[in-house]
Image: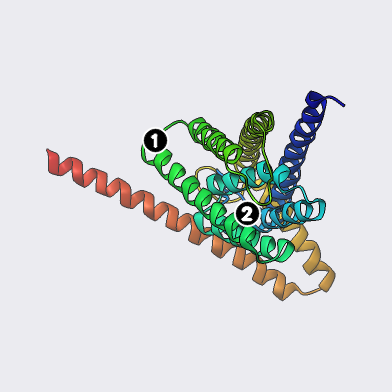
């Protein structure tokens, strides 16, 4: 097997692994959206159930990478995956969530590799990369740069990383030749772009599906469930109470629904009249 063949096989494997990670993550996210009936116009992965499942998913993924690296004894071949994981959680999740995942990965490193000088150095390096990644995300947000810019910053940071480890022999990495350094950086660049494109495309699709579902089931004027949804819910409730032969409870249900509807409409109408009154008063004062 030539060197080019030896390098290309891990590249294709890495690309398919990244795509698999994206698809599995999106399947989990869509299941969470359906189960918890999330109806936000735009999904927020930094809070709530989406954040909870994201932290657990990527935490387990980080543990798996550490286990495989220690089991196979190929620490250097899993660096790109770890960096992708680190940069992703910094971009898409909250800082608290990304820090929690970083701590889980650090503990997994200690468990699978043992406490040694190499482990201490790796943890120090991981902390440095985490802080730099946070700094880059803050800089991009502060200067309102295009989203793609943060990906390019991370590509440049990874290039510096591989150049450094070409000249500095890491205890667990061994000697990294120029061809290996270029390959590992090129692999990271390709997988990083795949991750960026795949996640953004699927996230936009999720936002669109949630938005369409919200518009299809909710009245835009009153923000109440539309008639079709209400009719389906009411028929289900009616059948349940009819089977129990409990007309008093059925009457209570009708009164409760009517009361909630009147309260919602009353609040909406009151707010509308209040806004109209304020506008009229402002116009009168202006005259």
Residue 52, picture quadrant: bottom right
Task: Answer yes or no: is residue 52 visible.
Answer: no
Give the distance between the C-alpha atoms of the residues marked 2 and 1, in whole angstroms.
25 Å
Residue nearest the observer in this picture, 282 or 243: 282
Residue nearest the observer in this picture, 155 or 124: 124
Q: Specify which label sits upstream in the sequence, 2 or 1.
A: 2
Residue 110 has which mark? none
Q: Residue at x 42, y 32 (%)?
A: 145
Q: How many marks?
A: 2
Task: Answer yes or no: is residue 249 visible.
Answer: yes
Query: Can you give x and y, in whole percent of width and height, for residue 281 in the image?
Result: 20, 47
**Which quadrant would the N terminus be assigned to in this image?**
top right
Q: Residue at x 64, y 62 (%)?
A: 104
Q: Which residue is mark 2?
A: 50
As displayed, is residue 44 above or below residue 49?
Answer: above
Within 10 Å of disc 2 (Cα), the crowding (few <14, some 14-19, many 20+) is: many
Residue 219, picture quadrant: top right
As displayed, is residue 97 above or below residue 186?
Answer: below
**Which quadrant would the C terminus be assigned to in this image?**
top left
Which of the two discs, 2 and 1, sits closer to the camera?
Answer: 1
Position of 241 with respect to 203 (left or right) is: right
Q: Secondary structure at mark 1?
A: loop
As displayed, is residue 18 above or below residue 227?
Answer: above
Query: Can you give x and y, in whole percent of width and height, for residue 157 in the image?
Result: 52, 37
Within 10 Å of disc 1 (Cα), the crowding (few <14, some 14-19, many 20+) is: few
Q: Secondary structure at mark 2?
A: helix
Q: Which residue is mark 1?
A: 144
Colouring method of the image:
rainbow
Query: Can you give x and y, in whole percent of width and height, for residue 118 in the image?
Result: 63, 57
Query: Can you give x and y, in whole percent of width and height, for residue 211 in the image?
Result: 60, 40
């Amino acid at each position: 097997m030539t060197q080019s063949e030896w390098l290309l096989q891990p590249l294709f494997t890495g690309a398919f692994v990244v795509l698999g990670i994206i698809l599995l993550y999106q399947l989990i996210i869509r299941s969470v959206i359906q189960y918890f009936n999330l109806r936000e116009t735009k999904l927020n992965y930094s809070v709530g159930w989406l954040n909870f499942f994201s932290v657990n998913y990527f935490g387990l993924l980080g543990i798996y990478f550490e286990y495989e690296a220690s089991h196979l004894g190929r620490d250097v071949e899993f660096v790109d995956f770890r960096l992708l994981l680190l940069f992703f959680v910094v971009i898409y999740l909250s800082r608290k969530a990304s820090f929690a995942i970083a701590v889980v990965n650090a503990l997994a490193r200690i468990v699978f590799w043992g406490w040694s000088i190499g482990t201490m150095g790796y943890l120090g390096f991981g902390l440095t990369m985490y802080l730099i990644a946070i700094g880059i995300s803050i800089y991009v947000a502060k200067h309102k740069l295009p989203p793609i810019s943060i990906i390019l910053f991370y590509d440049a940071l990874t290039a510096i990383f591989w150049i450094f480890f070409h000249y500095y022999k890491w205890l667990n990495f061994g000697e990294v030749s120029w061809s290996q350094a270029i390959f590992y950086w090129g692999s990271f660049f390709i997988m990083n772009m795949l991750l960026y494109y795949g996640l953004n495309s699927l996230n936009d699709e999720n936002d669109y599906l949630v938005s369409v579902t919200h518009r299809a089931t909710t009245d835009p004027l009153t923000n109440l469930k539309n008639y079709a949804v209400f009719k389906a819910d009411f028929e289900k409730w009616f059948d349940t109470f009819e089977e129990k032969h409990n007309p008093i409870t059925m009457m209570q249900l009708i009164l409760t629904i009517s009361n909630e509807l009147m309260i919602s409409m009353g609040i909406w109408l009151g707010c509308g009249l209040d806004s109209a009154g304020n506008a009229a008063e402002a116009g009168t004062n202006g005259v």
